[in-house]
Amino acid sequence: MSGDPVHAALDTQAAAVEPQVVAWRHHLHQNPELSNREVDTARLIADHLTSLGLDEVRTGISGHGVVGVLRGGLPGDRVVALRADIDALPVKEESGESFASTVVDTTYPGGPFPVSHACGHDGHTAMLLGAATVLAGLRDRLPGTVLFVFQPAEEGAPAGEKSGAKQMLDEGACDDPVPTMAFGMHLAPLPDTYVGYRVGNQFGASCMIRIVLTGQQVHGSTPWMGVDPMPAAGAIMVGIGQLYRQVPAFDPVTVTIGHVEDVGRFNIVPGTVTLWGTIRCSVEDDMADLQKRLTTLAEQSAAAYGCTAEVAYLQDVPAVHNLRKWIDAVLPTVERVVGKEKAYETPPTLGYDDVSEFVNAYGGVYLMLGAQDGELDDDGKPRPTPGGRGLVPNHNPRFYVDDDALVRGVRLHCHVAYDHLTGAITPEE
């Protein structure tokens, strides 16, 4: 329990805004927009922030990013940046929700794609809108500044386009005033009411792979008159399975080819084949070595089949790394909000999140917010609650979020923001 009356006021106002937060989340869920196309989502965010009478609402940052600036009514030099990602995924929804998405984007590069919020970003956006509402209502009791950072394209903009966290920073989204802490959380297939944290890498490092194999197009009836890049593509995908044996096995890595693109005709030997994929590393230093080895594999496999390979690594995202001093500083606040027994340390994951750009730039913490029907077993590992909907991973068509997790997210945003501004969350040097 806390003796600070502002903590109680934050909780009271979070409870009051909960129905609106749930409504926002359902609306966003039914109207998802892919990375770098978040036009209506950004408009909803900007309209609400404007209605709160914030000191400033910045729009059009890194595409469709929005930043709200709330200067508190009390003197203070600290600045906390609360971040939420706003984009959806090219995933067909199978959640069974009454508000499930039926959106199909017919113009997105590589599409058409079914679109859904299969990663919880709708909840992230709704929770931060709720936190903005609560904190704006108590601005006269805030000793410092809060930035509400709504980031587009966390899932990665189409190749050749710029957006995301790094682009927001490059465009000066948080330059005035500069944050002294960044904070965010990710809805996750962890037991509802629990918060997961990790000292060290919460998420891994990532990059996008593009391998363009060039041969010579010809009719499928006369392959000897051209150069077929398909066997080279197959050799590369098989060879990737041996890359794991070329790096130390103690730190997980994964290399995935998720999309193969050619001329799309069954009876044509294509002139080019493009492989799209991703590398994930639990230890960031392994990335350069894996990239070098994959480039060698691609170029030499292509040469073996008379083709050429052009390899590019795009959209580098650093690991989300929580420093011990920041975790130690924020844990008392987290435990006050959800209960000491409800905060637990989670294992690392090879997922990525470019919130790392904010955490690296300003310091801070990124947490996992449990939002599904689960419990911890005797070993402290999540397991599904009997009779519940299960623990469904992000990016799965059946991914879901329990709405009652949202108000906890609002409270966490508000308490962390207030505690940092008052100096209660300050890492020891």
Image (tube, grey):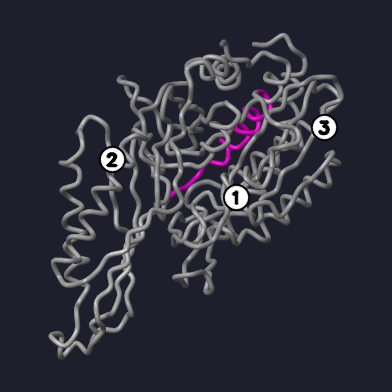
Q: Quadrant of the C terminus?
A: top right
Q: Considering depth in this image, is 398 or 271 the residue closer to the camera?
A: 271
Crowd tier of the residue under label 2, counting other residues whose Cα lies within 10 Å: few below 14, some 14–19, many 20 or above: many
Please provide percent x and percent y for residue 86: 60, 50
Residue sitting at 46 percent across and 34 percent down?
A: 320
Q: Quadrant of the N terminus?
A: top right
Q: Secondary structure at mark 2?
A: strand
Crowd tier of the residue under label 1, counting other residues whose Cα lies within 10 Å: few below 14, some 14–19, many 20 or above: many
Question: As shown in the figure, which amino acid type bears the numbered disc 3?
Answer: Gly
Please state the extent of the stretch shown in magenta in the rendering: 399-415
**Residue under numbered circle 3:** 137
Are the residues tagged 1 and 3 within 8 Å (C-beta)?
Answer: no
Crowd tier of the residue under label 3, counting other residues whose Cα lies within 10 Å: few below 14, some 14–19, many 20 or above: some
Which circle's residue, 1 or 2, is located before the other in the chain?
1
Residue 253: numbered disc: 2
Residue 86: numbered disc: 1
- Disc number lying in front (1 or 3): 1
- Disc number lying in front (2 or 3): 2
